[in-house]
Structure formats: structure tokens, C-alpha cells
Amino acid sequence: MQTSNFETSVRPETSERPRSRRTGSGPPRQPSVLGRQPSSLASCAVFVGAAALLSCAVAPPPAGELPSPYRILVTNDDGIESPGVQVLAEELRKIGEVTLVAPCGERSGSSMSVLLATQVRLRSYGADNESGGGQAESGAGDQQGAEMESAAADPAEDYEAGAQGGLSGRCVDNTPAGAVLFALNQLAPESGFDVVVSGINRGANVGSVSHMSGTVGAAMMAAYHGIPAVAASLGDMSDGFGYSARVVARFVSELGRRQPEPGVVYSINLPKGTAAETNGVEIRPMGGSFLKIEYEEFAAPDGEASADGERLFIPRFVDADPYPAGSDSEAYSEDYVTITPLRFDWTDGASLRMLMGWDLTELAEETP
């Protein structure tokens, strides 16, 4: 049984829950809290609320064994040829059965959007192509697969799994959430997936930026179908994805042994690519904005004329500090790995109760 480096605390429960794999049927259950014991009562209050301070000190229940086999769906928003998803899939194969299905190209910033008004084309690479059972596109797909494999194995891309055979997995011409939706419908084993892991993204997804993230959006599609999910993102990629993949794999292993509630996304953000540069792990709530997106106007390149009335703009990213105290954005900026549990349900309970007190009897009536 694999031991974990994660120290955890959870809310006590009244009964043991049976484990069941989910393929998407039925509404997700309400999630419980999973996380490392906070380092102070102040951070504890931020995480679970001042009224529940004592729950932070409750010892976690003993961890069980991983499901056998432990079935993991892996995806991302940077595309199938991204070294982040390839290295992550390789590391996760050490703890379970991995199905890798990602977009065929870059789909960053797509949130939870899905392409519905188009056919879905599935392409397979590596071992998945050899045993694809006719699912892969022939001809052009095989040629593109070879081109992608060559690009992914380029040392300049720091593709650490290249020595193990190059590009592997399947890709679809869809968004990250669309890739997960397709995989759950067409490629899931009979008993379903135990967990969905999205990443490793090129760039952080802390704070409110998470709402725009295709990495988080793909994990949210799993949560929508009642499946536990992890979204992983790396800020500094200069040292590659090996360390980050190992950290994520340890957490995914711990998650599988803890019988997590479905319908929750655990967002992991790693600021640095090595343990030496990382200050530790912090469990923090979403807060602040790690960056802002602005638009800057620029002139048309020489030789290219703009149409009448047309102006050209390009997005640029601007730092958005200071960050709220106790937030994931703050901890990430201080070089801590942050883990934030995110709910699929966006309902604001306080506003819901407020609206119930309004007199809205005439709202839908037409006045003569």
C-alpha cells in the first residue's frame, strides 16, 4: 500500500459510504472537505468557517486501499501533444489504469464550454493507436500523429516521457470539457472511471481565473457527472513537469484511498517545478485574482491592410496583486503548492434566502 506525504483532516461522518464508480448517471452528492490540517487557527477559520474551528483538529479516518484496478481518465486544455499531460499520464500509470483523452489542439480559456454543433473526430496515438479497434482516424490522422510525436519528443519541449515511446493517448476535436464528456460516453470502462485528472496546465489557475480555465472546466465536467476530479496547473515550467506530475500522482493516490465524495474538483497549483523551490503545501480557499487580462491595441503588420473601421487588439496578462489574506492566490505567490476544493454548485445560499423574502407575486404578471 502506497504511503502518502499529505497530512489530512476531514469532517466526521456518521456512517461509512460504500464505494461506487460513476459514469455520469444521477445527480452528484454533496462533497465533504478533504485537506491538510491547517498550520494555524486563523487559516483554519478561513478554510472551514469560524464556527467549525474544532473540526480542523479531528484526525482523519484511516485510509483504505486503492481500488483495483484504479481507473483514471486524464485530459488537459493545452492539447494532446503538451508535455504536461503526457508526463502526468505516464506518472499516473504507476498507480492505476490510465485513459488519456485530450483536445487535439490548444483550447486554453475555454472554461466548461462544449462544441455541440459539429461532429467529433477521434484520433489515437502510440499504444492506443495499435489497440484502437478501428476508432482512430486513418490516413491523415496517422500522419498527424507521427508529426505530433516528433514534435513532442523534441528536447526543446522538455518532453520527459519521450524516451518511453513518445506521444500516446487519444484526442478529439473539441474543448477540454467536451473531451471529458466524449470519454465518459464512449470510452469509459463498464464500471466507470474512479477519478478524472486534468492537467498539467501551462500556467497557474488560482483565484477567480479558475472560472475561465479549460483545465478546471474539464474537471468540472467530471464533477457534473458525479465523479471526483483533480485539476493541476504549474506556473514555472523551466524545470519541466516531472516533479509536478509526481506531486499530483501522490494526491490522486491519496484521494483514491480516502473514498472522496463525487462532484468536487480539487484544484492543485504548483508555483515551481522542483521541491527545492517549493515551500510546502497549503490548503486554501479560492480568493483574489492571480492575474488580469487586458487588451492592447497594435498596428497591422507591414504589408497587411486593415479593413475600413477595423482595429487590432491583442490580450496581455497583468499581475493583479495584492492578494486577499488566507487565499490560494496569496499562498501561491509565496511559492506554496495550493490545494483548493471547488464545488460545482454555484448557488449563493445567502442571496437565495434573501430572494425568498421578496414579494414577487406580480413579477410574472402582465399589467393591463
Image (cartoon, rainbow, N blue to C red):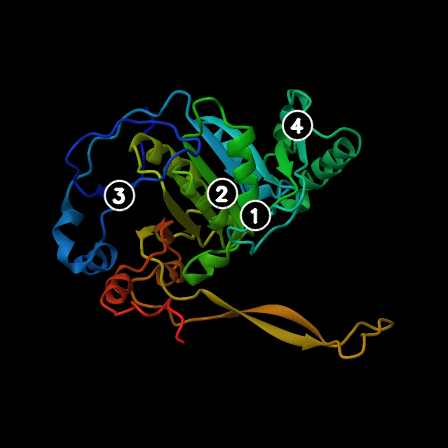
Instruction: Identify the disc placed on residue 135.
Output: none
Is label 1 in a helix, a strand or a loop? loop
- Rendered location of residue 28, percent (x, y): 35, 40
The residue carrying mark 3 is 32
Which image quadrant: the N terminus? top left
Q: How far separated are the C-alphas under marks 3 and 2?
A: 21 Å
Question: Which comes sooner in the sequence, label 1 or label 3?
Answer: 3
Residue mark closest to the camera, 1 vs 2: 1
Residue 168, quarter of the rendered image: top right
Q: How far separated are the C-alphas under marks 1 and 2?
A: 16 Å
Question: Which comes sooner in the sequence, label 1 or label 2?
Answer: 1
The residue carrying mark 4 is 126
Inspect the image, locate mark 1, and give the three-letter code of the amino acid beneath it.
Val
Q: How far separated are the C-alphas under marks 3 and 4?
A: 38 Å
Position of 30 compared to 70: left or right?
Answer: left
Q: How far separated are the C-alphas under marks 1 and 3?
A: 28 Å
Question: Which comes sooner in the sequence, label 3 or label 2?
Answer: 3
The residue carrying mark 1 is 114
Q: Residue at x 46, y 61 (%)?
A: 209
Inspect the image, locate mark 3, and give the three-letter code of the amino acid beneath it.
Ser
